[in-house]
Image: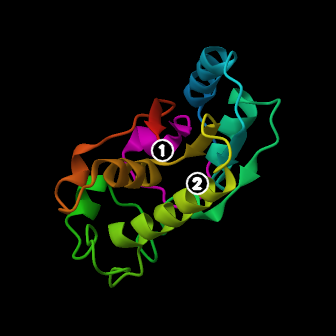
Amino acid sequence: MKLYVIRHGETLSNLSGVVSGRSDEGLTENGIKQAQELNRKLEKISFDAVYVSPMKRTIETANIIVPEYQYVIDERIAERDLGSINNRTIDELWELPLWNSLTEKRTAEGAETFASGLERVEDFLASLKKQFSDKKDAKILLITHSFISRCLWAIKHGISEDSDYTKFHHKNNEIVIYDL
């Protein structure tokens, strides 16, 4: 099975460097253009299923990239829950106690840790493998967020140190392909 992972198009938060978490912001004009470019790149690929985070920016991206598909909205691939943390840059967030934890599920502010994200993504992948167990050449499109993409990368590469997974960065509207 091939998993095509796309991070949503550019948002105002992406431009400002502020982590938006589960806020429901839409795409910028550039984000729309990015998605249109991906539509052209993916037009010859036939997907067996499309999964999208419930956030507005991923739904807008999906509607541009694969308008002909009925997609499944899945909470397990939603962006990181930031709890009571607001208006911080990623550099500020990296410094918070437990932010990168691979053992604790939440920070003192109620934000999800990396451990929580890994758990959600592993559950999502297990359900995909079960659902498509009879179709080894399935092509699945996933439109999601940086946090979920980083969790996928860590799972695929067997990352076990909390400092190692920070090395991966998924750009807006970039395609990363995994063999599962």
Residue 114 place in picture, x, y as percent: 34, 66
- Residue pointed to by mark 2: 129
| Residue at x 36% of width, y 48% of height | 156
Find the distance from the CA under tag 2 to the CA under tag 1.
8 Å
Disc nearer the start of the sequence (2/1):
2
Queried whether the magenta region covers residue 26, the answer comes back as no
- Residue type indicated by callout 2: Lys
Considering depth in this image, is 156 or 62 the residue closer to the camera? 156
- Residue pointed to by mark 1: 180
Rendered image: mark on residue 24: none
Instruction: Check the image and report above or below for 82 versus 55.
Output: below
| Residue at x 46% of width, y 33% of height | 177
Q: Which residues are magenta?
A: 1-25
Query: As drawn, is 54 to the left or to the right of 160?
Result: right
| Residue at x 48% of width, y 56% of height | 20
Q: Secondary structure at mark 2?
A: helix
Mark 1, residues whose alpha carbon is within 10 Å: few (<14), some, or many (≥20)? few
User: Which image quadrant is residue 178 in?
Assistant: top left
Query: As drawn, is 151 to the left or to the right of 47?
Result: left
Residue 51 place in picture, x, y as percent: 67, 48
Query: As drawn, is 73 to the left or to the right of 95?
Result: right
Considering depth in this image, is 145 or 136 the residue closer to the camera? 136
Queried whether the magenta region covers residue 5, the answer comes back as yes
- Residue type indicated by callout 1: Leu
